[in-house]
């Protein structure tokens, strides 16, 4: 992505163009840490959780689970430490919002972490940063040191009597370590393989202790919600999906980049009004709305508000808001093949239908794309994808099946044409 600031800013990103905002003084200058000062040691954790539940904030890591409800799962009685984990692994292809939040607003994240730590009674937060995000890790590391020096982290945060520490952990480049229990395994020094649930992390999480895992963007909303109130927050977005979301636009858009917009903004509005439409005056063919694991929408179905409740009706999902635009020169069989290759490589291999299914889908799509396949193989592809859904340890297998099912739902004739012609019918295929 060429731009370091979003094209359209909102409350999360309004100061991102100002380099000083990265630092402690710059953040303080715009009222930073005032919400933490007002809440820590003063508002009972139970009340903070109730406010967050009333706000309707949905987690921004892809599943859209209620943040307040998740916090309420932390046990009341504890006989030792409990933890918070900030998921900054951001490996979903098409998603780059967390990177910007880390690089341009690290103190906003730290304030969100402090508020969540107070509410959930966590003594330490582990921030698990994607291995490739070197600059983000450096920026956050600097912010943590500044916050410690200023008494914003440590044994007596902002003189509230509450103690909290933040520990940075670097990932090593595996997609599955973004899944929260794969992340916990990796954090503890083991292979990043998701755990069977239950027990959920709120019962047995990091190092066997109660743990809450939230995404970077989820934390960043907290100073705003707890500072400006539930009514203010609910006034933005839709009734079921309040607030803004950082939409990442990539692919064949004229102005790829980040756009902070209210949830419920039309996908067509984001593409044609904000991102300038498709590059080189070409027509749009399809758009993946929420990161690579969300099923594609064809050009005539882009008149949809970007919120989970509306996207679900079109058999897709909001995911992480990573919008991938494909123009009319794109071969959808090739798209399927690229997606399948990714999931084959990234499956952790614990579940048979995921390990074998991703391999089969990749093999079949490679054959169909080359024109080597047999017409019966489209039905086999559908069957394998269906059998991968549900019943696995984590939802990676569903995430691998859904995009393929979406491509077959909307672009089946293109698959059939490859098999009929014995080659790709598009001359200028694919240059994302
Ligand atoms: C295969 C897979 C990969 C995931 N990758 C990420 C990721 O990179 N970042 C993230 O925040 N959540 C990711 N998640 C979702 C997390 O498991 C978890 O739901 C999330 O961190 C919770 O945060 P939230 O409630 O604030 O959204 C992934 C889930 C799956 C199944
Ligand atoms: S679904 Fe796939 S990635 Fe998830 S635990 Fe099973 S094998 Fe691993």
Image: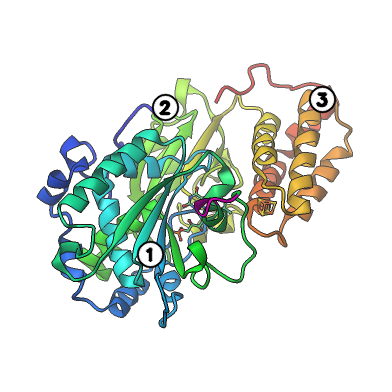
Is 219 or 76 nearer to us in this picture? 76
Q: Position of residue 206 (x, y in %)?
A: 49, 62
Locate the C terminus by quadrant.
top right
Q: Where does the magenta region start and end? A: 186-190
Q: Does the stretch in magenta take in 121?
A: no
Q: Earlier in the sequence, mark 1 or mark 2?
A: 1
Of badges 2 and 3, nearer the viewer stands 3
Vertical relation: 312 (above or below) 246: below
| Disc 3, SS | loop
Q: Which residue is mark 2?
A: 254
Is 16 or 254 nearer to us in this picture? 16
Of badges 1 and 2, nearer the viewer stands 1
Q: How is the image coloured?
A: rainbow
Locate the N terminus by quadrant.
top left
The residue at the far top in this view is 427
Q: Residues within 10 Å of mark 3 (few under 14, many from 20)?
A: many
Q: Position of residue 360 (x, y in %)?
A: 80, 40
Q: Earlier in the sequence, mark 1 or mark 3?
A: 1
Q: Which residue is mark 3?
A: 371
């Amino acid at each position: 992505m060429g731009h370091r600031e979003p094209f359209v800013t909102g409350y999360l990103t309004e100061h991102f163009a100002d380099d000083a905002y990265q630092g402690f003084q710059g953040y303080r200058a715009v009222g930073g840490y005032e919400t933490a000062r007002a809440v820590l040691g003063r508002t009972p954790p139970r009340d903070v959780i109730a406010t967050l539940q009333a706000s309707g904030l949905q987690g921004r890591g892809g599943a859209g689970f209620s943040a307040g409800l998740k916090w309420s799962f932390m046990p009341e009685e504890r006989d030792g430490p409990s933890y918070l984990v900030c998921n900054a692994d951001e490996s979903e292809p098409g998603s780059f919002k967390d990177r910007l939040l880390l690089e341009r607003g690290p103190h906003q994240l730290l304030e969100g972490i402090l508020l969540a730590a107070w509410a959930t009674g966590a003594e330490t937060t582990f921030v698990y940063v994607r291995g490739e995000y070197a600059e983000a890790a450096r920026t956050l590391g600097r912010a943590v040191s500044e916050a410690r020096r200023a008494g914003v982290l440590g044994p007596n945060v902002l003189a509230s009597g509450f103690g909290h520490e933040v520990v940075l952990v670097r990932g090593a480049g595996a997609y599955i370590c973004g899944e929260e229990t794969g992340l916990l395994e990796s954090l503890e020094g083991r292979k990043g393989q998701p755990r069977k649930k239950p027990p959920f992390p709120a019962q047995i999480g990091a190092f066997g202790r109660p743990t809450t895992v939230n995404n970077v963007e989820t934390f960043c909303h907290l100073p705003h919600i707890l500072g400006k109130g539930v009514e203010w927050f609910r006034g933005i977005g839709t009734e079921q999906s309040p607030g803004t979301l950082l939409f990442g636009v990539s692919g064949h858009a004229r102005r790829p980049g980040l756009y902070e917009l209210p949830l419920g903004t039309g996908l067509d509005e984001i593409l044609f009004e904000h991102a300038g439409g498709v590059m080189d005056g070409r027509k749009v063919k399809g758009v993946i709305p929420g990161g690579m694991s969300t099923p594609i929408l064809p050009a005539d179905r882009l008149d949809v508000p970007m919120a989970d409740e509306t996207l679900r009706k079109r058999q897709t999902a909001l995911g992480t808001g990573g919008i991938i635009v494909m123009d009319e020169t794109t071969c959808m069989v090739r798209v399927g093949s690229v997606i399948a290759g990714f999931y084959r490589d990234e499956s952790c291999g614990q579940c048979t239908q995921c390990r074998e299914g991703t391999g089969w889908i990749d093999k079949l799509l490679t054959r169909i794309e080359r024109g080597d396949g047999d017409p019966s193989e489209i039905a086999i592809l559908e069957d394998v994808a269906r059998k991968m859904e549900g019943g696995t340890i984590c939802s990676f297998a569903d995430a691998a099946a859904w995009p393929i099912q979406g491509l077959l739902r909307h672009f089946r004739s293109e698959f059939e044409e490859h098999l009929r012609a014995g080659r790709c019918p598009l001359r200028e295929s694919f240059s994302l």
